[in-house]
Amino acid sequence: MIYIIALIILAMAVAWFASNKPWKKEKLEEEKVEIADDCCGAHEVCESDSLLTSSDNIEYFEDEELDRFKGTPSKSYSDEAIEEFRDVLYTLKEREVASWIKSMQLRLVELPDIIREEALMIVEERRMKAS
């Protein structure tokens, strides 16, 4: 009879300890993620900084005039054309740059190489600030 009572107490102690793991609480605290102000919160990873196109919705940033460069290779832009892209890039908010790059991809407009590098630097700096 004493063995049965001891086994029941031991089983209850093990069950209580397993449900109240101290390392489990520490892990939950480590996994807290800060959500960006401009993120909608509907996705596990914020898509506002993602360069992968998950939707086919084209978003314009008052840059409709750049559609005329559709099909132009990234290395063949004139200095004037590059300045047009730069003007648009530097009027965007930091959080809009990744969306602008996605929009240009969907519109089949290749960014000039130098502008693409500048835009990717802005996106990378924003990601570094967020982490």
Image (spheres, helix red, strand yellow):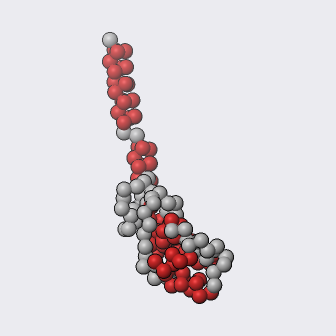
Q: Residue 74: x, y in percent?
A: 63, 74
* x and y percentages locating residue 104 in the rendered image: 51, 70
**Does 14 sit left or right of 118 as displayed?**
left
User: Could you say which quadrant of the image residue 5 lies in?
Assistant: top left
Q: Report x, y in % for residue 114.
A: 62, 78
Residue 13 placed where, x, y %? 36, 29
Residue 5 seen in the figure: yes
The residue at 44%/66% (across/down) is: 58
Nearer the observer, 17 or 102: 102
Image quarter (top left, top right, bottom left or bottom right) of the N terminus: top left
Residue furthest to the bottom in view is 80
Residue at 59 percent across and 88 percent down: it is: 80
Q: Is residue 8 above or below residue 72?
A: above
Q: Which residue of the protein is positioned furthest toward the top in this rendering?
A: 1
Q: Is residue 19 above or below residue 40?
A: above
Q: Tell me which residue sits at (42%, 63%) in the image.
A: 57
Residue 106 vs residue 22, the one in the foreground: 106
Residue 116 shows in the view: no
- Say which residue appears at 36% left-offset and 59% top-offset: 41
In the rendered view, tell whether residue 87 sits above or below residue 123: below
Q: So how many labels did they put on this image? A: 0
Of the pair 110 and 22, the residue shown nearer to us: 110
18 sits to left or right of 97: left
113 or 28: nearer the eye? 113
Task: Tell whether 48 sits left or right of 74.
Answer: left
